[in-house]
Image: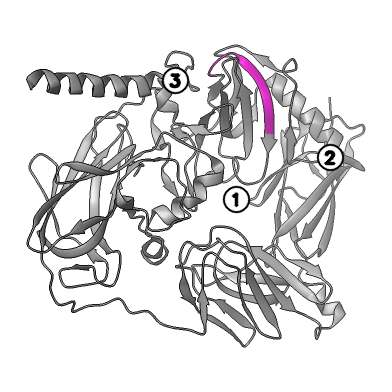
Amino acid sequence: MKKKITLFIFLSLLGILHSQNKYPTDYFIRPLEIPLVLSGTFGELRSNHFHAGLDIKTQQVTGLNVLAAADGYVSRIKISQWGYGKALYITHPNGYTTVYGHLKKFSPKIEAYVKKQQYLKKSFEIQLYPTSSELKLKKGNLIAFSGNSGSSGGPHLHFEIRDVKANILNPMLFGIQIADHKKPTIQSAFTYTKNDTSQVNQSNKNIELILKRQKNGDILANTVYAYGDIGIGINAYDRLDGANNHNGLYYLDMTLNGKKIFEMTFDKFSFSESRFINSYIDYERYARLNQRVQKCFVDHPINKLSMYDKMINKGYFNIKDSLDYKVTISTKDFKGNTTKLIIPIKGRKDTILISKKIKETPYYFKTNQANSVGNDSVKAYFPKNIFYENFYFNFSSENGIVKLHNRTVPVHSYYKLSFDVSNYDKDKLKYMYIAKKNKSKKWYYVSTKRKGNSLYTSSKELGEFTLLSDIEKPIVSPYFKKEQWLTKSRYLKVKIYDKKSGIKSYRGEIDGQWILMEYDPKKNILTYNFSDKKFTGTTHTLKVIVKDLVNNSTTFTRTFNKKFN
């Protein structure tokens, strides 16, 4: 018997070793010269997506050297106002691609290559695909400088590794070392009943468990009295050395009386499946309380997350009357630091005192078919399979405000919302747009198109919508006075702002020639680097044309003095 147990342990360890070693662990070097401290881990739970890489802290500054993680060539360069901001993609001989995001600027050779194309296309935002011979690199070459561009919330480097199929992989699998001696933290846990006959503590609703921390760091829940099919969800996070950020877990499993019924590893996924995070978490609780509870079960049939490793009965377990059970949930980080949650359960079929209340409406949406609501002034069309489950849908249209259910129900892909505008004056109509109310109860512009007598938009969120008008032109404010001498200045800066619909486009010129003005939408600043071009004479005219999203336009001109050497 002992020989069998020893063989089983050996084979298990061999399997773990094989799974970790299928990726080269000595091929890539770290992309920064400083010790790596993370603000974000791979697979971390984010809004509508799993985090696709490592967010590496840059000591609260920009401008640190970013290095090529291995030999290769620059295969893609993308510059955008949001998202990854300034981003670089390097393809390597072994088939993998590394991605470097939120950069400040590129190394001199790459920067020159990019600027040449920006001036040719007369656009700050650009996407380029150099050939394999244009921008070759060696491991450790300087490729860029760290920054805070795009949707970054602070200075850091976003680093990814992708395979030949564009799947995103956990960089830690490749030997990228991150110091971590801290165990994950389990903040709270919840029970979920699968159907009307399931109960926990005489309730058919979701129940938060009472937890107690043990001396060894594990968590023990108060005894639960239950019957029927039950699921468990946890609110948990991990911390790494040198940072207080709440990071994501690497591994999660659940056993019932020692038998594993659920297992998940955050090591690989594709962008196409990332939005299934809204099925993986308790989305209603997230929408109401901003808490992401990770469900150790799958309750939506269209959830196709590939990070699930093992599942018995979709992660639900059946509790029978008069029997005792022990549920154990193990949470791990990449280094193997572990925190366990133990839930004692006693089977007891009892009277259900608290039941789920379902508010019925005239609209019952089935996920496997197309659904629609509307009246003479507004219509919404929802293709099939964009909701995770069947439910009663709330719809109203009063005083110009359309309510499409509420934001506690996730939408997996786009639906169409259209307004009839045939009764509006044509002159007013060209300034109108569709707006949505955000969590702060403020209206904001959503992409609006017109076809015939309709204004329409596509959205992935439910909530309140209305029609608004924007007749105000964008505001342009320079950071220099009229005819000011700027000879010693390296940069020319202008602030642009639109109060309602937002900025759509801009164009900058000096003495009638197009100039590259970099736009930082977080600060509403346009910046021109004087080293880009030389102009003759000493008196020059800056011209900036800014349009908002309904095409109100402002043209601003101002003279300044500067000698270009």
Q: Is residue 425 left or right of residue 314?
A: right
Q: Secondary structure at mark 2?
A: loop
**Residue in view at x 45 percent, y 51 percent:** 277
Q: Which residues are magenta?
A: 69-77
Q: Pointers 3 and 2 in contact (CB under 8 A)?
A: no
Q: Amino acid at mark 2?
A: Lys
The vertical placement of 299 against 355, above or below, is above
Alpha carbons under labels 2 and 1: distance apart: 22 Å
Q: Secondary structure at mark 1?
A: loop
Binning the other alpha carbons within 10 Å of mark 1 as few (below 14), some (14 to 19) or many (20 upward) gives few
Quarter that holds the C terminus: top right
The vertical placement of 550 against 542, above or below, is below
Q: List the residue tagged with mark 1.
A: 522
Q: Secondary structure at mark 3?
A: loop
Labels 3 and 2: the sequence-earlier one: 3
Which tag is nearer the camera, tag 2 or tag 1?
2
Q: Pointers 2 and 1 in contact (CB under 8 A)?
A: no
Q: List the residue tagged with mark 3.
A: 23
Alpha carbons under labels 3 and 2: distance apart: 42 Å
Binning the other alpha carbons within 10 Å of mark 3 as few (below 14), some (14 to 19) or many (20 upward) gives some
Q: Amino acid at mark 3?
A: Tyr
Q: Is residue 269 left or right of residue 151?
A: left
- Asked whether residue 489 appears in the rendered view, the answer is no
Q: Amino acid at mark 1?
A: Lys
Labels 2 and 1: the sequence-earlier one: 2
Image position, residue 283 (x, y; %) = 41, 61
Residue 166, by quadrant, is: top right
Image position, residue 327 (x, y; %) = 17, 49
Q: List the residue tagged with mark 2.
A: 122
Q: Nearer the viewer, residue 187 or 520?
A: 187
Image position, residue 55 (x, y; %) = 46, 35
Alpha carbons under labels 3 and 1: distance apart: 38 Å
